[in-house]
């Protein structure tokens, strides 16, 4: 298949095989590591919006969830735009594979001294909400001001005609965090800073424009970045959404912005999955079968090192690894898998 503009090939069937391969690889890694995997970061778009047109949303979702259920640790699922093409918020609020569904932002502590903050970049959006939902009505107002090319139905119009720069983010496949969530986000970071916790932020839509192509950021990314910069506790931001992926190190606040590549890029020939290990030596290690398939080779990203490990048996497991220096001393180490679907 292809993207909506039919300019980029997408490997839909191959991406499901990649998910199956990812779970198999995580299981193998788990068997050869002393520290267990803590959780899977599934960064959104678990299934494609085309399933809705084919009337097979439930079937596709169940097949994907069956694979994740085989994984050696729990999965943290994030709402992406393709979840909202398939299901509305009322439906998502009733499922057991999300935390809340309707307002899918929350935090948890995977290890002492650490907090993971999960954001929902479609609280203010043209997709997923009922027509009279205040969050959708706010999205209609925003779009009318920022990009009147977009029809209020979120489908019609020549979206990007005459739109340049970061204004290109005002399209229906992006969304906004909204004031309610951003106030909560600020409070979460303030609490983490007070408790001397380090924070990992996860969002489907990108928060820093340098961590994407400049058009797949949240509508209110500037406010979110301001909150991140207001405290010293955030060490990394993990995102999906932009299929090519990207990496940017913000020297101003020492935050690593990682936008992981989609398995749609290469299908069965790709390896868009891996593991993140945060070590006590003040580094964040990203490892995978092929790092370039997971986090692209862009300026500032270290070159991968080829390594291998073993559980004491004759079989060795080869993988690639990069290490990113974190900005402050750590209280403990954690290890988690990442999949940017």
Image (cartoon, helix red, strand yellow):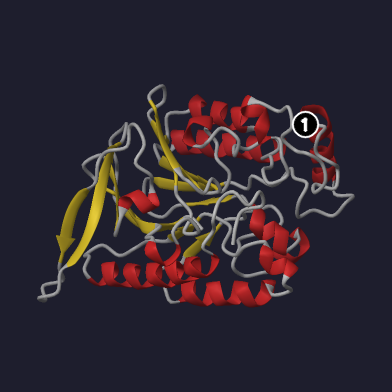
145 to 76, vertically: above or below? above
* In-front residue for pair 6/109: 6
Local packing at callout 1 (Cα closer than 10 Å; few below 14, some 14-19, many 20+) is many
Q: Residue at x 32, y 51 (%)?
A: 291
Q: Quadrant of residue 316?
A: bottom left
Q: Position of residue 13 (x, y in %)?
A: 52, 70
The quarter of the rendered structure image containing the N terminus is: bottom right
> Going by the image, does 45 lie left or right of 247?
right
- Viewer can see residue 301: yes
Q: Position of residue 244 (x, y in %)?
A: 48, 46
Residue at the disc numbered 1: 147
287 to 253, vertically: above or below? below
10 to 284, vertically: above or below? below
* In-front residue for pair 271/332: 271
- Viewer can see residue 257: no
Q: Residue at x 82, y 41 (%)?
A: 157
Q: Position of residue 99 (x, y in %)?
A: 61, 61
Element at badge 1? loop
> Going by the image, does 33 lie left or right of 217?
left
Q: Position of residue 268 (x, y in %)?
A: 41, 67
* In-front residue for pair 153/30: 153
Q: Residue furthest top?
A: 252
Q: Residue at x 68, y 46 (%)?
A: 173
Q: Residue furthest right?
A: 132
Total numbered circles: 1
Q: Residue at x 32, y 72 (%)?
A: 27
229 to 237, vertically: above or below? above
* In-front residue for pair 232/101: 101
> Going by the image, does 47 lie left or right of 322?
right
């Amino acid at each position: 298949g292809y993207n909506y503009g039919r300019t980029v090939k997408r490997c839909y069937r191959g991406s499901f095989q990649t998910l199956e391969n990812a779970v198999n690889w995580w299981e193998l890694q788990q068997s050869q590591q002393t520290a267990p995997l803590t959780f899977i970061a599934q960064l959104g778009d678990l299934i494609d919006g085309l399933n809705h047109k084919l009337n097979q949303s439930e079937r596709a979702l169940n097949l994907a969830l069956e694979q994740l259920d085989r994984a050696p640790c729990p999965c943290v699922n994030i709402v992406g735009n393709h979840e909202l093409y398939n299901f509305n918020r009322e439906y998502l609020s009733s499922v057991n594979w999300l935390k809340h569904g309707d307002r899918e932002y929350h935090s948890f502590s995977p290890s002492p001294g650490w907090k993971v903050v999960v954001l929902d970049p479609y609280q203010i959006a043209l997709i997923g909400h009922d027509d009279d939902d205040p969050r959708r009505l706010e999205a209609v107002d925003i779009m009318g001001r920022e990009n009147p090319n977009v029809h209020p139905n979120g489908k019609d119009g020549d979206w990007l005609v005459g739109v340049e720069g970061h204004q290109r983010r005002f399209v229906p496949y992006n969304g906004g965090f909204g004031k309610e969530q951003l106030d909560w986000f600020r409070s979460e970071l303030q609490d983490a800073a007070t408790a001397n916790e380090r924070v990992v932020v996860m969002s489907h839509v990108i928060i820093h424009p340098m961590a994407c192509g400049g058009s797949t950021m949240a509508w209110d990314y500037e406010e979110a970045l301001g909150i991140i910069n207001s405290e010293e506790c955030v060490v990394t931001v993990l995102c999906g959404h932009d299929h090519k992926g990207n990496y940017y190190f913000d020297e101003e606040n020492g935050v690593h912005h990682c936008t992981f590549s989609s398995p749609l890029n290469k299908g069965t020939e790709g390896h868009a999955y891996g593991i993140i290990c945060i070590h006590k030596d003040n580094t964040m290690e990203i490892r995978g079968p092929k790092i370039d398939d997971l986090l692209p080779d862009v300026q500032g990203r270290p070159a991968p090192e080829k390594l291998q490990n073993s559980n004491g048996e004759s079989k060795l497991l080869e993988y690639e690894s990069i290490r990113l220096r974190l900005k402050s001393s750590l209280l403990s180490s954690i290890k988690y898998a990442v999949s940017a679907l």
